[in-house]
Amino acid sequence: MVNIVIVATANYLWGAAVTVRSALETCSGTLNVYVICVDLSTEDKQQLVRSWQTSNLGQLKFFDFTLDQLTGFRTTMLVKSTSSYARFFIPDYLEGVSRCIYLDTDLIICSDLTALQNLDLNGKSTACVIDGGISTPDQQERLRNKLKLANPQRYFNSGVIVIDLDAWRLREIQFKVLSIAKEQHALLDQMDQDALNMALADDWL
């Protein structure tokens, strides 16, 4: 059984539909889908439900999220919405779930996510992939001097995250990342991705 989580917004409804549908079509077993909704109407949700009707769809749950909870969080010239920070609240919504895979909604899933669901995290709370855009001197300087990462070569992309939710709760990672996002927002050029890298600096595979 695989548990995936997305943050779905009205502006990226098609992306949400495609990301989850492709995950369903490539998954060899039951796939549970948890959707944190930002500004989705009843009709939006109904369209998603219709587009995800496959034989291996397990639980499908929608959670309404209001951006009022993110007042004062950093945005950038390129990204004006704070909706991506909604993923920080995944442990609250997935009560009773021990592990999930967070997916951005600009993905097409081409492999069975069962392997990620069962990945050995070697005691870490999280698994991610190294970001492909960190090799430039400017980025290395930013990661080292601004974000204070001890190893600026280890900066992950937050588009796909395997999360041990039990470890997140035990280690209070949600509290840490929310505190960073609120108190150090001026440093976060990459918004929520920077905050996650700072909070998980020594705790990701």
Image: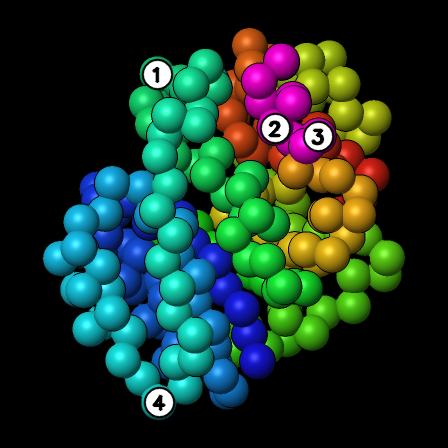
On the rendered structure, is 87 left or right of 105? right
Disc 2: CA contacts within 10 A as few (<14), some (14-19) or many (>=20): many
The amino acid beneath tag 2 is: Leu
> Is the residue under label 1 in contact with that under label 3 (CB below 8 Å)?
no
**Residue 52 against residue 70 in the figure, above or below:** below
**Residue 201 pos. (x, y %):** 77, 35
Q: In the rendering, at what x and y percent does residue 181 appear?
A: 58, 22
Q: Is residue 168 above or below residue 50?
A: above
Which SS does the magenta portion mostly show?
Answer: helix
* Residue in the image at 76% along x and 18% along y: 148
- Residue 196, located in which quarter of the rendered image? top right
Query: Type of residue at label 4?
Result: Ser
- Which quadrant of the figure has residue 194? top right
Please state which of the two labelled residues, at mark 4 or mark 1, is closer to the viewer: 4
For label 3, count other residues whose C-alpha is less than 10 Å away and answer few (under 14), some (14-19) or many (20+): some
Write the start and end of the magenta stretch as one range.
Answer: 175-184
Real-space Cα separation, disc 3 to disc 2, in angstroms? 6 Å
Mark 4 near mark 1, Cβ–Cβ under 8 Å? Answer: no
Q: What residue sits 13% from the left and 57% below the top?
A: 43
Q: Which residue is depicted at the point 48% across and 34% down?
A: 85
Please give the residue where the numbered disc 3 appears in the rendered image: 176
Question: Marks 3 and 1, Cα distance to the nearest angstrom?
Answer: 25 Å
Q: In this view, does 115 lie above or below 153?
A: below
> How far separated are the C-alphas under marks 4 and 3?
39 Å
The residue that disc 2 covers is: 178
Instruction: Mark yes or no: residue 132 visible.
Output: no
Mark 4, other Cα within 10 Å: few <14 / some 14–19 / many ≥20: few
Q: Closest to the observer: 68 or 124?
A: 68
